[in-house]
Amino acid sequence: MGEAIVITSGKGGVGKTTTTVNIGTALALSNKKVCLVDSDIGLRNLDVLMGLENRIIYDLVDVAHGRCKLNAALIKDKRFDCLHVLPAAQTVDKTSVNPEQMKQIIHELKQDYDYVFIDCPAGIERGYKNAVAGADKSIVVTTPESSAVRDADRIIGLLEKEKNMEPPKLIINRIRKQLVKSGDMLDVDDVVSILAIELLGIVPDDEAVIAAANRGEPIALEPSNYASIAYRNIGRRILGESVPLASFEESQGLFSKLKKLIGIR
Amino acid sequence: MGRKLQYVTIKGTKDGFTLILDDRCSYRELLDEIEEKLSVATREPNDNRLVPVFLETGNRYLNEEQINTISELIRKKKKLYIEQVHSNVITKAEAEKMQKENRIVKIEKMVRSGQVLEITGDLLLIGDVNPGAKVVATGNIYIMGVLRGIAHAGANGKTDAVICASKMEPSQLLIADIAARSPDELQVFNHEMEYAYIDHNLNQIRIDKLQSFTMLQQTYT
C-alpha cells in the first residue's frame, strides 16, 4: 500500500503540474511505481506536459461515474513502465466529481502504486477539496513572490485543518539567483520564515523547463540540468534520503556561511 | 405591621445621596419603604439639578427589571436619579463573563492568511500572524513572534489595551475603535520588541519600544 501526496499551491501558474510531472518522473527513475492523477477537471494539462495527450480514451470522471474500470483509464508513460497517468476530463467541470468518489479512486490506486501524486487545481473551492480528499501527505509549491506566498499561506492553513493529513512540506519554485542577490526577489529564508513549514526543496528558474514542457518531455530526464537535479533531489527526499540542498539550491545566508566554513571569502 | 426596623437608610454625602437597602426584607417591603421615605423627606433644592443617588443593595441581588422599578420610583418622587448600583453579589453568568475578560488565553500556532483568531480576554500567541490573517482580543494582545497581519486589541472598547509583538510589521493595528495602518512607502523594520497603544493626547495609535511600556503603565496608575 503506497501513499497519496497532493501537490497544491493556491495560486495558479506557480508550477504545480510541472512539479508533479517531474517528481513523478524522478521517482520512476528510481524504479518506484508511480501514478500521477490530474484533478484539474476541465483544464487538464498534465497529459500535455508528459506528451501523452493522444492516448487518452477514458478519464477520471468516467472512472468516478463507473463508465469504465480504473485500469482502462490509466495511461502508461512512453518512457517508464512503472509510471502511469490518470487524466482529467476536459469536457465537464469540477462539480462532476465529489470528494467521496475521489477518495475511493485514490484508495484503489494506493493498492497498486508506491506513490500516487495528485495534481491540484488552483483555488480553494471544489477542485481543491476533491484533490485533497484522498491524500495522506501534501506538498505546497510556491514561487518567491509575495502573492504566491500569501496564497500558499492560506492553503497551508487549510491543509493543517485536514484530518488524517501530515503537516505539509514546501517546494520553492523558480528561484532566480541574480534577482535574489540584488535583493529584488524574496530569498528562501524569507519565504520559509513566513510559511514556517518544512522545506522539501528549491528549484531554480530555467528556460529549459519550458522548452522540455513544450516537447512533452519532463525536464527530470535530462541528467545535467540544474532544475532536473533539483527535482531528483526532491524525489530522493520523498524516498526518505537526507539530501543536502545543492549549491544552486542554497539560500544566500547558508551559502556564505558554508564558504566561510571552508575558508574561501 | 411591625414596621420598626429600618429597611432603607438614607445618607447624604458630598456627591449626593446614598440609599442603603436592607438585604433581609422582602422586595415588596423595600419598595413600600422607599416610597414612604421619599414622600416624607422635604426640602427641595431650588435649582432644577438632578441629584445623584448611590444604591447599596448589600447581599441582595436585584435584576435589571427590579433596578429599573426602583429607579423609576426614585425619579417619580424627587429630583433624583440612580448614578450607581453597588451590590455584594453578582450572577454566575456575570462572574463567568468577568473571569473570561480577565484571563490570558495562551495559543500556540501560526495564524495564517484568511484565518481569524478571536478570543475573550488577553491573547498570548506563540507563533506568527501572517499577512492576511487577523487576531482579535477583548483585552491586550501579546505576540511572541512576528505580527504581519491585522491585530485588534480591546475589541469591546477597552481603550487602554495594548498590542505587543516580538517583531512589529503589521498591515493594520486596531485598538478599541481607533485604527492605524502601515505606511505606504517601504520601511526598514527594526527588530526590537515593540508595543502599540492609544496616545490619549493625540487620540491615535502609537508604536514604541517595549522598554517604555513600564513607563506608560506608571503614568496610568
Image (cartoon, grey):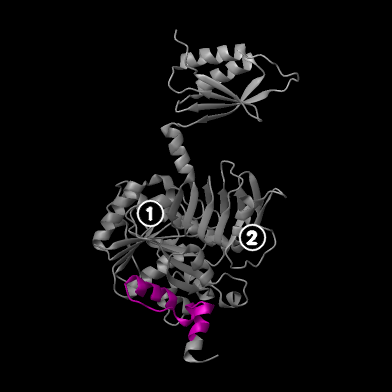
Residue at point 39%, 73% (across, down):
A234
Residue A117 locus on image (x, y percent): 36, 62
Closer to us: B46 or A190:
B46
Q: Could you tell me which chain the residue with mark 2 belongs to? A: B
Write down the quadrant of residue B49 in the picture: top right
Residue at point 48%, 63% (across, down):
A195
Residue A111 locus on image (x, y percent): 24, 60
Magenta segment, which residues?
A: A229-258
Q: At numbered mark 1, what does the secondary structure look like: helix, strand or loop?
A: helix
The residue type indicated by label 2 comes to: Asp
Residue ranking furthest to the right: B47
Is residue A161 positioned above or below B50 on the image?
A: below
Discs 1/2, front = 2
What is the magenta segment's predominant secondary structure? helix
Q: Which mark is residue A120?
A: none
Q: Is residue A246 found inside the magenta-colored segment of the image?
A: yes
Left or right, residue B136 beside residue A46? right
Quote the CA–CA distance across marks 1 and 2: 44 Å
Residue B37 locus on image (x, y percent): 57, 14
Give the labeled residue for mark 1: A132
Q: Are marks 1 and 2 in contact (CB under 8 Å)?
A: no
Q: Could you tell me which chain the residue with mark 1 belongs to? A: A
Closer to us: A90 or A82:
A82
Residue at point 41%, 55% (across, down):
A159
Quadrant that contains the N terminus of chain B: top left
Give the labeled residue for mark 2: B208
Q: Is residue A52 found inside the magenta-colored segment of the image?
A: no
